[in-house]
Amino acid sequence: METLIILLVGVLTAVAIYLILSRNVIRLILGTAILSHAVHLLILTMGHLKTGDVPLLGEEAETYVDALPQALILTAIVISFAVTAFILVLAYRAYQDLGTDDLNEMRGVQDE
Amino acid sequence: MHLLIVAILIPFLAAALIPLLYRRLGNLNLGWFVLTVPIILFTYFASQIPMIAGNETITASLDWIPSLGINFVAYLDGLSLILALLITGMGSLVTLYSIYYLSPTDSLPHFYAYLLLFMGAMLGVVLSDNLLVLYVFWELTSISSFLLIAFWYHRKNSRSGAQKSLLITVAGGFAMLAGFLMLHSMTGTFSVREIAVYIMQYTDHALFYPALFLVLLGAFTKSAQFPFHIWLPDAMEAPTPVSAYLHSATMVKAGIYLVARFTPIFGGTAAWFWTITIVGLITLFWGSFNAIRQTDLKALLAYSTISQLGLIMSLFGMGSAALYFDIADAAAIYGFATFAALFHLINHSTFKGLLFMVVGIVDHQVGTRDVRRLGGLAKFLPVTMVFAVVGSFSMAGLPLFNGFLSKEMFLTATVNVMSMPAFGADIIGWLIPVVAWTASVLTFVYSMIIVFQTFFGKFDSKRLDRAPVEPNIGMLISPAILSIMILGLFFFPNVLADNLLAPAAAGIVPGVDAAVTIGPWHGFNPEFFMTVGIIVLGAALYLLLPRWGKVYNLLPSNWSFNNLYTKTLSFTEGTSNRLTSTYMTGHLPHYFSYIFGFFVLLAGATLVFTGALNLDSSNDQPASIYEIMLILVMAGAAIAILFAKSRLSAILLNGVLGFSIAIFFVLFRAPDLALTQLVIETVTTVLFLVCFNYLPEWRKEYTPRRTKVLNAIIAIAGGLTVTLIALSVNSVDLFDSVSSYFEDSYELAGGNNIVNAILGDFRAFDTMLEVLVLFIAGIGVFSLIRHRVGKEADSDENQ
């Protein structure tokens, strides 16, 4: 199971990197979103999967799954949403001001 | 703390006080405060003369970095004392002169602060026994020199002159540092005195000669030796008191000091003897030859300083051979050169300092220092004229002035090399006196130019900015003191010789009886006839200068070392500019590929080379059919995004990924994550769709095939690296999990939901900062939307 998830993480990472290397802003943003998906899965897998029950003490189970990665991921999901929202608006503004969504055309002056 | 160390620190402290005092005292009185510093220090060093004359030394130590053997060790012997007296003595005279020379509109606090900084640094150089401390002070003199040359920084020439001096002297300083480190690796100590003792065992060491040449490189750049002399004429952009102080009397002597200080270490080898002697003689000749063609009096003095520094340098080179001979008489013959070098070092500071002050007065009073515009000033500036005569005649080596004595000792030293040849000097040794004599003739010529073309000849007021009058009496005090010293040293040279020169020479060439009684008359020996020849031929050449001056036009103007420097500089700048612009392209995708490329190389290589790669999946949980299906869906959706033709399909596929992950969170016992992910994914998708309303539809990207392939390689390699790292981590449990701690969340935090307890209690600060990030992002989004576009915004800013 873990190995399969890790392979999926690898595929997602490769796709994310390819999209990030693209010239189109939307593809770039999609890339970062997919990269965070990959990282979330990775963190969860690193804490081992399905080794116990849901980490709710009311369940009174024998063992619980590792709660720490979940807490970390919860934070990460929210932050990555904030960043995605911000760069989306940035892309919108860049298009308004510069009239392009192509990163190569957004290039600044020669000697800044 | 010993007084000697305090003496080094006083100028720094005074420099730090200047900004405070400036507010209280204002421009005028600041100089008088600064003047007290060198005078107090001079008095202190002068009071050490009797002790040094008795061949004693002082050592004072202060721990700095004892674990690395770097301590602040101050060491005062004859050589250091001579330099220390020059630094503080000339420092006093120059400060006094500056008070009257500088205009109140100049930024005086800066000037005096830099001057004191230099004074402290220079004292540090000549009093440090520890090589690394010496190096730090050495570079500090370069920096203060840079600041002083660029004092009038609104002039382009000042800036480029400052840059040139800094580049050359600091480059030499680096070389010297490398030499110091080699010496340390050979002998295991940074102390000059200890190295001089231990070095005997290491003369065959592979690093011995590299260290020798690297140290010499530092000395030659600092003392403006050929071919590094080109920075000194450009340094004349500094205010004249600075030129008198740093660039003739003290800082440029640091290289000479270094050679003298290292003679006990490297002296007695052929490399040391020949390198210094030859470089010194070439510098002597080239400087005097070029001085004659200068029309700017300060440039003339700069070349003359180069030439005189070469003279002193060559004397130290010849003197070092004394350490080669075991026979006392032979050693003494060479040791004499060291003695002469020390004498001329002092004499040069007196007459060159005086001449700079004279030129400063002329410049200050009539507004030009171009010899083509000057002439006949004797009538208007009679006192200044007398100073000029004293200084120039001393430099030319005429009797009644101290320069005569040391110049003749120099000639004696060159002739001595012939009488007792060392290191194969019997073959080409005859060149030494010939070059020395020729250069002395040229020295005579340019010395005459200073006096006669400035103060005699035709006076033409139209060519001057102002009507010439004698300056304020205060400006004449310092030159007067120097003139008296020049005459005094001619009549009573042995007061100096016995008390300072003899102990200093004994320190440079230990065990050699180098000291002699200095006198003006030695009978009709070769030196006497050489001097007569210099005067006769020099006078003739001066008178015939208009006839033979055309010889300078024969030199191709673009073949100068200056040109080489400029070309090198622009070449370096151009090359590094081109090199940088090959990879700093301004394209974001390029920068991303560097980042991911380096990640793959570094992380991947670490994984492989540390043997951390480990693919053991035996601890895996079994996978259910739903999970495998979900994995396939996600992998398929991810790959499909790459080929999505429209942005709508891409964002839908991204939604598939997001919601699949939510299902994974459910399967992996993470209900909180699943809930959050569902909400966030929905909002994100909506946000994308809203933005699409304003953004253009995807066009076909015309990315070259090569770029696409390269990107694919980077992407696949990145994915592979992550996979391998994750698999390796998954294979072993290096540490026990800390998570069991949180399972007491009810007792510790009163929460049954462990994840919530972590977020809201155990790691509440994290959560708070996370909210802060959200808040900042929100402000960013808000201001980006509200911010106005284009011209409207520009006019907004201009209001």
Image: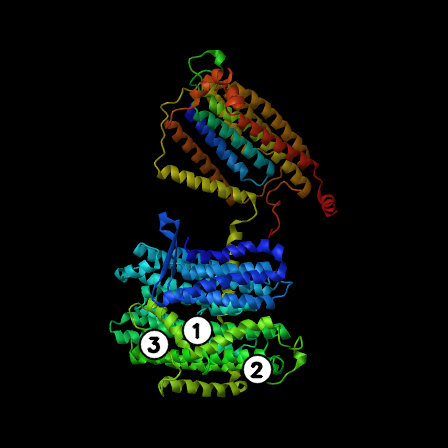
Pointer 2 and pointer 1 on the same chain: yes
Mark 3 Cα within 10 Å, few/some/many (few <14, many 20+)? some
**Residue at x 61% of width, y 24% of height:** B682
**Residue at x 42% of width, y 20% of height:** B740
Q: Give the image location of residue A61, x and y in percent.
A: 44, 12
Left or right of B348 in this view: A33: right
- Amino acid type at circle 1 is Thr
Q: Give the image location of residue B297, x and y in percent.
A: 56, 75
Q: Residue furthest left?
A: B327
Asked if residue B463 shows in the view, the reply is yes
Residue under circle 1?
B283
- Mark nearest the camera among 2 and 3 is 3
- Amino acid type at circle 2 is Gln
Residue toward you, B759 or A85: B759
Q: Give the image location of residue A25, x and y in percent.
A: 60, 38
Mark 2 and mark 1: span between their CA atoms?
A: 25 Å
Asked if residue B259 shows in the view, the reply is no
**Quadrant of the rendered image containing residue B214:** bottom left
**SS for dot 2:** helix
Q: Earlier in the sequence, mark 2 or mark 3?
A: 2
Residue under circle 2?
B453
Residue under circle 3?
B516
Position of residue B226 relative to residue A101, above or below, is below
Residue toward you, B410 or A27: B410
- Amino acid type at circle 3 is Val
Mark 2 Cα within 10 Å, few/some/many (few <14, many 20+)? some
Mark 3 and mark 1: span between their CA atoms?
A: 27 Å
Position of residue B520 relative to residue A35, above or below, is below
